[in-house]
Each structure stands twice: as C-alpha cells, then as structure tokens.
Image: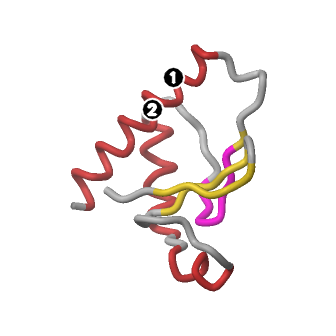
Amino acid sequence: MPLSTSGYGNVFGLWPAERAPRDFDEAARIANPGFSKALHLELRRAGLLLMPSPYGRLYLSFAHTDAVVEEMKAAFEQAVERLAEVLL
C-alpha cells in the first residue's frame, strides 16, 4: 500500500500515494476522504486516535516518549496491514 508523508519538522501529513504532493493542486487530487476515514477507524481499533481528515496533520512533541512512539508505530502497522487486506 503506497503511503508518503509531507510536512515540516514535527508536523506532517500522510498521503495515500507513492510520493507526497508538491503543491495544493496535487494535494487536492491525492486527498482521499474515504482513505482518511478508513485509516482513522483502523487506528482507533488499534488504540490510537487520529483526526479523520484528508488534509489532517500529525504532531510529534517531546511529550511523546520512546514507548509512546513505539505504540504509535505498532498501531500504524496494524492499521495499514488491515487496510491493505481490505483495499488491495
């Protein structure tokens, strides 16, 4: 399942594409509300709450310990694995 990220520093977004958009027009073409909702629901199932938005942002901070980042990683892996089963 292709996924890419874009952003700056600790603020980034996920895109259901091989590469991140370079401008707003590309972002509008790539944005997929259905994918965003499905990812949101699968992440909730895995114990992680994420804003369901095709232009949603993720924020990392010093409050996210290594253990929390590992939990997030596991939740994303589980969610993407499940989405790949359903979507592919």
Q: Which residues are magenta?
A: 52-58
Q: Quadrant of residue 64?
A: top right
> Where the C terminus falls, by quadrant?
bottom left
User: In the figure, is residue 77 to the left or right of 25?
Assistant: left
- Mark 2: amino acid: Ala
In the rendered image, the vertical position of residue 87 relative to residue 77, given as above or below: below
Total count of labels: 2
Residue located at (69% from left, 55% from top): 7
Q: Which residue is mark 1?
A: 71
Q: Is residue 3 above or below residue 65?
A: below
32 lies above or below 62:
below
Residue 50 image label: none
Q: Is residue 16 magenta?
A: no
Q: Mark 2 packing: few (<14 Cα in 10 Å), some, or many (20+)? A: many
Picture disc at residue 75: 2
User: Which residue shows up at 57% across the image and 72% down it?
Assistant: 21
Residue 5, percent across and down? 56, 55
Q: CA gap, disc 2 to disc 1? A: 6 Å
- The image shows residue 9 at horizontal and vertical percentages of 74, 44
